[in-house]
Image: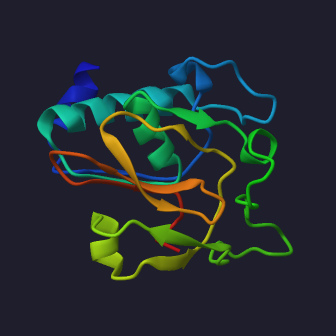
């Protein structure tokens, strides 16, 4: 923790990327059979990093897993497997396969909340996005507000309600 704190103290902002599932133990739930294997070290570092970012009021941009960690760090929970826990939901897990290796497949639109930072950046009320996740926000953390939704109601973006720039998106804009 001391080494991490020394590194964190040199940061001007935080960017959390996509990756493996967040361990449900961090939000007090038993592991669902479809929840993937966790990365305990990554979970600990990213949760600690977000606490540090909040203390220092650093800007945060979180993508895919990053949005999920952001929500969990603030006290929210996740659907561990959208297809089984939200059976009426759209397909959200368009992961690359040998037949379809691209990560740029535009899977569905997201509807962006007017007046949100995201709406200001995108300049539109709806945008097509890729979708490579099987987990999603279940209970939103206090201090976050949803700012984009898939047509099925799944939260696709969140923003902090006060303080510094905090934005999380469920898709991969880098693609």
Quarter of the image that includes the N terminus: top left
Q: How many marks?
A: 0
* Residue displayed at 53% across by 74% down: 175
- Residue 132: x and y in percent read 65, 60
Q: Is residue 92 left or right of residue 19?
A: right
Q: Residue 101, located in which quarter of the rendered image? A: bottom right
Residue 97 appears at what percent x and percent y?
A: 81, 67
Q: Decide if residue 88 is on the left or right side of residue 158.
A: right
Left or right of 32 in this view: 27: left
| Outermost bottom residue | 123
Work out whether residue 157 or residue 65 is closer to the camera in this orientation and state it: 157
Q: Quadrant of residue 102?
A: bottom right
User: What is the x, y in percent for residue 128?
Assistant: 56, 78
Question: 82 above or below 152?
Answer: above
Quarter occupied by residue 144:
top left
Q: Is residue 100 left or right of residue 54?
A: right
Q: Give me the residue at 64% from left, 78% from top.
A: 106
Task: Depth check: give the residue in front, 19 or 81.
Answer: 81
């Amino acid at each position: 923790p001391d080494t991490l704190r020394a590194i964190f103290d040199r940061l001007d902002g935080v960017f959390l990327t996509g990756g493996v599932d967040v361990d449900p133990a961090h939000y007090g739930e038993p592991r669902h059979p479809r929840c993937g294997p966790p990365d305990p070290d990554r979970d600990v570092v990213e949760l600690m990093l977000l606490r540090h970012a909040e203390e220092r009021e650093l800007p945060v941009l979180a993508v895919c897993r990053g949005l999920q960690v952001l929500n969990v760090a603030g006290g929210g929970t996740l659907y561990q497997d959208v297809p089984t826990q939200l059976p009426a939901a759209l397909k959200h897990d368009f992961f690359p396969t040998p037949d379809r290796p691209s990560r740029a497949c535009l899977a569905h639109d997201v509807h962006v909340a007017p007046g949100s930072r995201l709406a200001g950046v995108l300049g539109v009320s709806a945008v097509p996005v890729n979708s490579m996740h099987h987990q999603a926000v279940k209970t939103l953390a206090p201090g976050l507000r949803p700012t984009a939704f898939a047509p099925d109601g799944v939260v696709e973006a969140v923003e902090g309600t006060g303080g510094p720039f905090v934005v999380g998106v469920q898709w991969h804009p880098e693609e």
